[in-house]
Image (cartoon, rainbow, N blue to C red):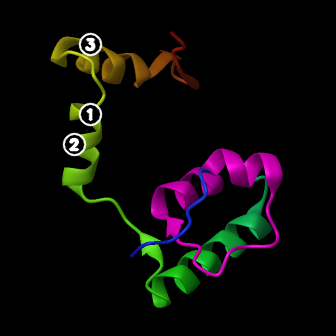
């Protein structure tokens, strides 16, 4: 399915309104936009967009192999990749608060 795809950073920074006819959407981008949604109205619009892209067969959904190949192609050693994953995991300082540790 060749086409144009925008990264999450493009949607956030430029908020494109004139879209190319061959635009395809990534499920990952939709999830990232939903995670940063300011309110329920935006979430409803994103949910409607997901359904539309899915019906039009323009929704790219990575498989487990896709995710695995990204890690393999990262250029980091296995130990470094494991450390990156562990360091990105939430750290709970107390029962009421959880955060991602920056590195």
* Closer-to-camera residue (58/84): 58
Q: Residues within 10 Å of mark 1 (few under 14, many from 20)?
A: some
> Cα distance, mark 1 to mark 3?
11 Å
**Can you tell which mark lies on residue 71?**
1
* Closer-to-camera residue (101/53): 53
Instruction: Say if 9 sits above or below 24 in the image.
Output: above
Q: Position of residue 14 (x, y in %)?
A: 81, 52
Q: Which residue is mark 2?
A: 68
- Number of numbered discs: 3
Instruction: Say if 56 sits above or below 87 in the image.
Output: below
**Can you tell which mark lies on residue 80?**
3
**Residue 60, quarter of picture:** bottom left
- Is there any visible trace of residue 58 in the rendered image? yes
| Span of residues in magenta | 8-36
Q: Are marks 1 and 2 in contact (CB under 8 Å)?
A: yes
Q: Are marks 1 and 3 in contact (CB under 8 Å)?
A: no
């Amino acid at each position: 399915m060749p086409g144009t795809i925008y990264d999450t950073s493009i949607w956030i920074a430029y908020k494109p309104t004139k879209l190319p006819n061959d635009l395809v959407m990534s499920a990952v981008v939709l999830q990232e936009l939903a995670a940063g949604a300011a309110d329920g109205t935006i979430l409803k619009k994103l949910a409607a967009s997901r359904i539309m892209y899915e019906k039009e067969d323009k929704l790219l959904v990575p498989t487990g192999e896709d995710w695995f190949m990204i890690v393999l192609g990262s250029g980091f050693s296995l130990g470094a990749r494991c450390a990156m994953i562990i360091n990105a995991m939430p750290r709970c300082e107390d029962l009421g608060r959880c955060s991602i540790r920056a590195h």
